[in-house]
Image (tube, helix red, strand yellow):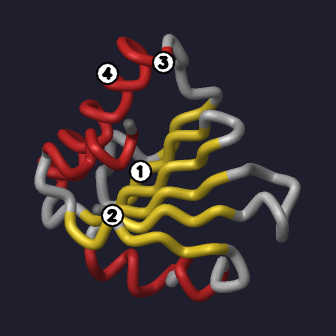
Amino acid sequence: MAAKACDEKKAKEIRVININKVSYISEWILIAEGLSDVQVRSITKSVEMELREHANIEPIRKEGVNDAKWALLDYGDLIINIFQPDIRKFYDLESFWSNGEILKFP
């Protein structure tokens, strides 16, 4: 649902990483890219609304939404990171979690 919500707002390079065998902090990491502050906020809002309406869950924690260079939504078993391109390259979470199972979406 979260990846689909990202895709509906034209997020780029959506990756879903299963980390349950390599980390205890979460089961899944979702990484997506928005090309501007406005798009990062739009993707973040879309994900929140989708998960609220269809899964009846709220994020435990949110970070970076106001600045919108990078936004984090923490749902416990799912951690969502939405980056602008330069910030995504800087943090390179795909490499950090490369020992997990990386899935492309769609």
Secondary structure at numbered mark 3: helix
Q: Residue furthest front?
A: 106
Q: Amino acid at mark 4?
A: Met
Secondary structure at numbered mark 2: loop
Q: Residue furthest right?
A: 24
Q: Which mark is residue 71?
A: 1
Disc 2 from disc 1: Cα separation: 19 Å
Residue at 18% across, 40% down? 42
Q: Quadrant of residue 88?
A: bottom left
Mark 2 crowdedness (10 Å alpha carbons): few <14, some 14-19, many ≥20: some
> Is 55 above or below relative to 59?
above
Q: Which mark is residue 49?
A: 4
Disc 3 from disc 2: Cα separation: 20 Å
Do the numbered discs 4 and 2 sit on residues whose CB atoms are within 8 Å? no
Residue at 31% across, 40% down? 44
Of the residues under marks 3 and 4, which one precedes in the sequence?
4
Total labels drawn: 4
Mark 1 crowdedness (10 Å alpha carbons): few <14, some 14-19, many ≥20: many
Disc 1 from disc 4: Cα separation: 15 Å
Disc 3 from disc 1: Cα separation: 20 Å
Q: Which mark is residue 105?
A: 2
Disc 3 from disc 4: Cα separation: 10 Å
Q: Amino acid at mark 2?
A: Phe
Of the residues under marks 4 and 2, which one precedes in the sequence?
4
